[in-house]
């Protein structure tokens, strides 16, 4: 059992209304709807920072993921969760903009997801407890890598990236 399995999160319904609380482990085991944020951090050259998840993660260890991501804590807003995750995972602070929202489904790992974007000159300093490595990718290179080796990526990251690109970003 990982140290985050006992973390208490809000359980929500299909309309994102809180219906109760449960441990992270129970939520994931029972495929209950809950809330999460993902962040796409870009540099001024238009490249996106992509992280390689720590091997210690219980879900998708060692694969490529959004710049930063995490669960929304009980009573926390999506925006505050995004600010916290950016600080915890990349140790940076910058202006965030909400980009899109996805309803909870199998493709989102049963998470209602809000995606935030940022453009910054701040250099990410990955937290080694969360991230084993990270690098900036040109969007076209990331898209090509996803198409050629989808197994290298967290599935929801691929879904978010495709939705982001469809939105004309």
Image: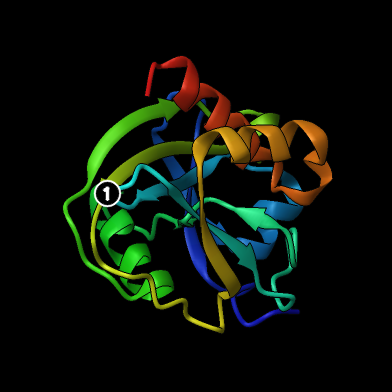
Sort mark 1 into few (<14), some (14-19) or many (20+) by Cα contacts within 10 Å. Answer: few
Name the spot of residue 35 as percent of width and height, x first. Answer: 46, 45
Residue ID at (47%, 48%): 20
Residue 108 shows up from this direction? no
Q: Quadrant of residue 169?
A: top left
Left or right: 56 as drawn, with respect to 21: right
Residue ID at (38%, 70%): 124
The quarter of the image holding the N terminus is bottom right
Left or right: 160 as drawn, with respect to 169: right
Towards the viewer: 44 or 165: 44
Towards the viewer: 91 or 168: 168
Toward the front, the furthest residue is 45
Name the spot of residue 157 as percent of width and height, x first. Answer: 60, 41
Residue 34 shows up from this direction? yes
Residue ID at (69%, 71%): 57
Left or right: 147 as drawn, with respect to 68: right
Q: Secondary structure at mark 1?
A: loop
Name the spot of residue 120 as percent of width and height, x first. Answer: 24, 56
């Amino acid at each position: 059992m990982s140290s985050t399995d006992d973390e208490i999160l809000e359980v929500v319904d299909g309309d994102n209304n809180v219906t109760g609380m449960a441990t992270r482990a129970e939520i994931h085991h029972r495929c209950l709807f809950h809330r999460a944020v993902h962040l796409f951090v870009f540099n001024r050259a238009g490249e996106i920072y992509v992280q390689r998840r720590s091997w210690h993660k219980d879900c998708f260890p060692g694969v490529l993921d959004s710049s930063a991501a995490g669960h929304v804590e009980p009573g926390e807003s999506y925006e505050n969760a995004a600010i916290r995750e950016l600080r915890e995972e990349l140790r940076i602070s910058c202006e965030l903009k909400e980009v899109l929202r996805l309803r909870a489904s199998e493709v989102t790992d049963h998470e209602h997801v809000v995606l935030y974007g940022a453009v910054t000159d701040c250099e990410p300093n990955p937290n080694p407890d969360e991230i084993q490595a990270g690098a900036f990718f040109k969007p076209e290179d990331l898209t090509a890598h996803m198409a050629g080796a989808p197994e290298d990526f967290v599935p929801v990251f691929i879904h978010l990236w495709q939705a982001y690109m469809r939105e004309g970003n």
